[in-house]
Image: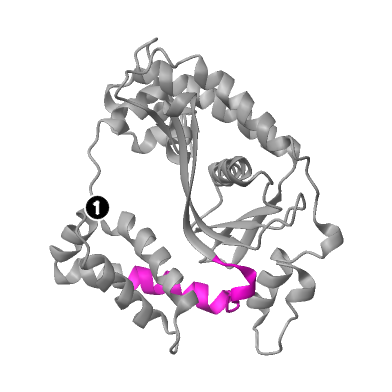
Amino acid sequence: MAQEDTALPASLNPAQKNVLSQLGAKPDERPEFSADLQRILKQNLEEVAQTFIRDIPDNESLFVNKHLLTQIMGCEKRYIADSEESFEWSVPTARGTLSHKAIELSIFWLGPKDPLTLTNEALSRAEQGNDSLASWIKDLNEGDRAQLCGDVNSRVGSFLETWPPLEKRWRPMLETPIRVELAEGKVVLSGKVDLTLGSAGGNIAGKVIVDFKTGKFSPSHRDDLRFYALLDTIRIGIPPRLVASYYLDRGEFTPENITVDVLESCVARISDGITRLAQIRFKMRPPTTQAGPPCRWCTISEECETGQEYLANDDT
């Protein structure tokens, strides 16, 4: 998105104009990156992944995503406990998936765009699938279904109120999967980006990556976006110009310009995460315990001496 491509029509409300001003950039404001950056970043990750290639069984791969990285960089014992829990759909876990689908529909929707129509369409499409989400939706009671629709409707409504209509020339893409394979496919970095706008031109960065959030800011949100930026850099060779968390309930951005230093910092974090995940998953060492606010909702806190000591002294 370039600022000269995004004149601010009078029909847009202040929040929508703010989105355009936050995401736009003039051509001379877009950074240029070396063509060697892609090779260097991937090579640094490859060196770390190669150290574990003999420890990973032939029929297995070490999958790394933003959620696992956040978990393993915290309390390793909690990571193990959470990984042993079987995933179950619930209203809180399903509303994000369905909200993203409804927002995606809104971009290409030809008729009037009202949030409830888009919400019902997203729910109907998900229910017609043949996966676990479809089965869960079919078994919902009337109250839970109504709550789910209400939650999704609120998120979609917030998006339509605060975002300008996304034009095709901005190249909007939603729920885009990105993947990087290392160590002959033994280590796989994967993610799914909520929204991308724009594209690189030669070695000039132009893409913007946006992650939709609700609630308050967390440092992990910035780490998630850096993870996406690194994977996209390795995938196409040029980093995105900007990444941003967008908080739907507040209509606010938390943006960050992508630089070589940011990408190198992300490589260091992912390298540490790969090492920890491999060591814990393949039992090269015992897991460590790290006390902190997550102890309040940790499933094993009652049997964790470190966690109980933290909770006993926690005054917040």
Q: Position of residue 279 (x, y in %)?
A: 42, 16
Residue sitting at 43 percent across and 26 percent down? 75
Q: Position of residue 19 (x, y in %)?
A: 66, 70
For the N terminus, the image quarter is bottom right
Q: Position of residue 107 (x, y in %)?
A: 49, 75
Q: Quadrant of residue 63?
A: top left
- Residue 282's place in the image compared with 182, above or below, is above
Residue 310 visible in this rendered orientation of the protein: yes
**Left or right of 246 in this view: 155:** left
Q: Quadrant of residue 200?
A: bottom right
Q: Quadrant of residue 312?
A: top left
Badge 1 marks a residue whose secondary structure is loop
Q: Nearer the viewer, residue 305 or 67?
A: 67
Residue sitting at 57 percent across and 79 percent down? 165
**Taken as a whole, is the magenta stretch helix, strand or loop?**
helix
- Residue 191's place in the image compared with 39, above or below, is below
**Left or right of 153 in this view: 200:** right
Amino acid type shown at disc 1: Trp
- Residue 233's place in the image compared with 99, above or below, is above
Farthest residue in the top direction? 285
Mark 1 = which residue? Answer: 89
Residue sitting at 58 percent across and 29 percent down? 269
Q: From which residue to which does the magenta span run?
A: 150-172
Residue 291 visible in this rendered orientation of the protein: no
Q: Position of residue 81 (x, y in %)?
A: 29, 28
